[in-house]
Image (cartoon, rainbow, N blue to C red):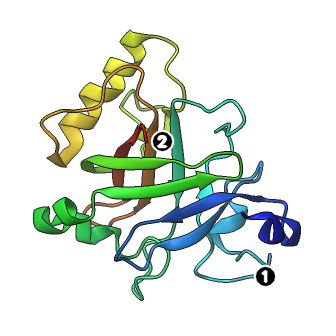
Amino acid sequence: EYKSLYNQNKNLIGWLEIADTNIDYPVMQTADNEYYLDHNINQEEDKNGTLFLDSACDVVKPSTNFIIYGHNMKSSAMFGSLKKYLDEEYWQSHKTIQFDTIYEKGTYIVTAVCLGKVEYQDDDVFRYYDFLNAESKKEFNVFKKNVEKSAVLADKEPIKYGDKLLTLSTCNQYVENGRLYIVAKKIEQ
């Protein structure tokens, strides 16, 4: 399905779409998490950047959590419209996310809308952006507990060990280095 686009740019890893929103973009991945902050799919400099999957995520042997980053553009481009998820009515009517990798299709349901921040390296705090693979149920439950603490909105039936997750992350200036992140779990079709 994405063959012609992949042939155009071998960094293509998938496509992200949220129905009834402007989020309908290719997702890139490189070893450098900085590159697509200011480059588009054509590898041209672009202040909007492009959505990209964390370099440590693996789509061949899927990790527990795919993390996709994108800019919070005032124009609503990229992840500029994610802030609308802070409104419960909007969240309830936009819970389904389609993230297809170049290997498989995936439908996800948003379970939590969270606020966090980028922390200093030496601070011993929760970093949602460091959680990629649950090595144990205990490790997963630590992530789950911290997501619940930082959730502004959350489902009554939260994520559970064994779920495949998708996290969408963007800037949110509610505090310095603030972040808005959406946690979704994959549903079987």
Image location of residue 69, percent across then percent down: 53, 58
Residue lying at the far right in this picture: please name it. Answer: 7
Task: Kindly tell me whether residue 121 is visible in this rendering.
Answer: no
Q: Quadrant of residue 61?
A: top right
Q: Residue at x 20, y 61 (%)?
A: 91
User: As shown in the figure, which amino acid type bears the numbered disc 1?
Assistant: Glu
User: As shown in the figure, which amino acid type bears the numbered disc 2?
Assistant: Tyr
User: Which image quarter holds the N terminus?
Assistant: bottom right
**Marking on residue 159:** none
Image location of residue 84, percent across then percent down: 25, 71
Residue lying at the far front in this picture: please name it. Answer: 189
| First reached walking from the N terminus: tag 2 or tag 1 | 1
- Contact check, label 2 and label 1, Cβ < 8 Å: no
Say which of 118 and 47 sits in front. Answer: 47
**Marking on residue 129:** 2
Task: Kindly tell me whether residue 33 is visible in this rendering.
Answer: yes
Looking at the rendered structure, the secondary structure element under dot 1 is loop
Image location of residue 156, percent across then percent down: 12, 36
Q: Residue at x 12, y 62 (%)?
A: 88
**Marking on residue 44:** 1
Say which of 84 and 61 sits in front. Answer: 61
Marks 2/1: CA–CA distance = 26 Å
